[in-house]
Image: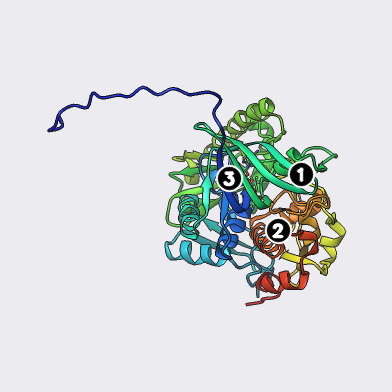
Amino acid sequence: MALDRKARTGTRMVRCEGAPRPQPVNVDICVLGAGIAGVSAAIEAARLGRSVALVDGQPALGGQAVNSIIGTFVGLFSNGPNAYQLTHGIADDILRDLGDKGALHYRRNPQHTTVVMYDEVALGRWVEQAVLKAGVKSITGAILRGVVRDGRRIRALDFATRYADVRVTAAGFVDASGDAALAWQAGLPCQEADEGPVYGTQMVVLEGIDEANLPAREELAERQKKVVEKYGLVRQDGFAFAFPGRGTALVNMTHVETPLDPIAVTQRTIEGKAQADEVVHMLKSEYPKAFGKARVRAYGALGVRQTRWIVGRHHLTVDEVRAGTRFPDAVARTSWPIELHEREGYIWEPFGPDHIHYVPFGSLTPPDADNLVAAGRCIDADTAALSSVRVMGPCIAMGAAAAHALDLAGSGSVHQIDIGALQGRLKDNLTRTG
Ligand SMILES: Cc1cc2nc3c(=O)[nH]c(=O)nc-3n(C[C@H](O)[C@H](O)[C@H](O)COP(=O)(O)OP(=O)(O)OC[C@H]3O[C@@H](n4cnc5c(N)ncnc54)[C@H](O)[C@@H]3O)c2cc1C
């Protein structure tokens, strides 16, 4: 239909004059990475009255929780029949708001763990609205290009975006990049797994499934093992969880390497989708009643579990995790099993109903930086220990800890804050049992 007005014909000439200057942003706290750890840090810091920038290379907020379609929150509850919530803060808001929308489904296994399925579209919108409401300045599509460091202090981060470069200057910084990108580019020591890679997964959502005929998790895992060669599968176990009433299933049945190399990781991303297609072929052939009409509704971005992480003041060990060591500077807790993904399968070491293990503040703090705190899957731990604390429950708790620590430090050092005061602020995430 033609518009009932004169056609617009006017233009104006524009030209880039000289070398473009980076757009300056000045805040109290800059959070690198808008995954669940960074979102928690940013919202907590804003609620403390701090001005906050939340910066991420992806075009949408939410990190892997949203963009890789992880699909379930784990590590958020203790184990066993009397499970209680271990992490609060934004976890309370998410459980309440998504629960009200029918966008959650609890899978409780009385012997072991509580898994909370979520609708990733609803979570993505929740993150955007919560960040906006908190007054956080978010910058997406912004890749970290450089760190301005002055001895023990980080002064600014430089980003490239498609529109202009951006320089964020702040008093305190959170490295919630998952890959320790900030610490790495600041020249601080980092670590990687040295006994082979920790495998990632290409997550996929299927639609058109028949929930009533869905095989039990154990049966599916047994069948997958038996038909690995027949369908050319890489992984021998995994799961397909239905979201009740929607005719969809979340499928986590592939294993892909996630190298820190731009060209290799692009290849692995394509390989991950090919693996997922083989899995779908297997499901349709082996379980025609449940999956005969299934179609791929969405492939997530390649899911990355463990790549590179910081060297902090404390190296959390698997023995400390198994022992449930309660550190004097504990800031987060979980009961999630050791879950270490290798090529064909994964090491799964669950804990009993009374078990809780803790993350010390020392594992979040590089000793040579006064105003940098890591949170999420790039904190200091051995490879197995990290596998049990990098899940979303403790990631939310670590984000909150980073925000409060930087708030307490102000223009001083996070190494000199009153740990008792920090723990007082985080008491719900450390001691609450109901
Ligand atoms: C396949 C898979 C399945 C999983 N299953 C579960 C599960 O069921 N339940 C659960 O609770 N946990 C699960 N986990 C673990 C959990 O999802 C992640 O460990 C957690 O989401 C990590 O959150 P994060 O905030 O630390 O990092 P991320 O979500 O990885 O966020 C980091 C962000 O930093 C940004 N970034 C990184 N580098 C740069 C840079 N240089 N410049 C700009 N931005 C940058 C990235 O774009 C990203 O958005 C799973 C993980 C994977 C991979």
Instruction: Name the residue at 66% across, 44% down.
Output: 156
Disc 1: CA contacts within 10 A as few (<14), some (14-19) or many (>=20): few
Asked whether disc 3 touches disc 1, contact meaning CB atoms under 8 Å apart, the reply is no
Q: How is the image coloured?
A: rainbow
Residue 129 x, y percent position in the rendering: 45, 55
- Residue 150: assigned label: 1
Residue 4's image quarter? top left
In the displayed structure image, the side of residue 81 where residue 289 appears, left or right: left
Q: Which residue is mark 2?
A: 411
**Which is more toward the observer, 391 or 249?**
391
Asked whether disc 2 touches disc 3, contact meaning CB atoms under 8 Å apart, the reply is no
366 to 82, vertically: above or below: above
Q: Quadrant of the N terminus?
A: top left
Disc 3: CA contacts within 10 A as few (<14), some (14-19) or many (>=20): many
Residue 295 x, y percent position in the rendering: 46, 38
In whole angstroms, how far apart are the C-alphas of marks 3 and 1?
21 Å
Where disc 1 sits, the SS reads strand
Can the viewer see residue 355? no
Work out whether mark 3 precedes mark 1 in sequence or the reverse, and give the earlier one: 3
242 to 422, vertically: above or below: above
Q: Residue furthest left?
A: 4
The amino acid beneath tag 3 is Val
Q: Which residue is mark 3?
A: 55
The amino acid beneath tag 2 is Ser
Work out whether mark 2 precedes mark 3 in sequence or the reverse, and give the earlier one: 3
Q: Mark 3 near ligand 1 (CB under 8 Å)?
A: yes
In whole angstroms, how far apart are the C-alphas of marks 2 and 3?
21 Å
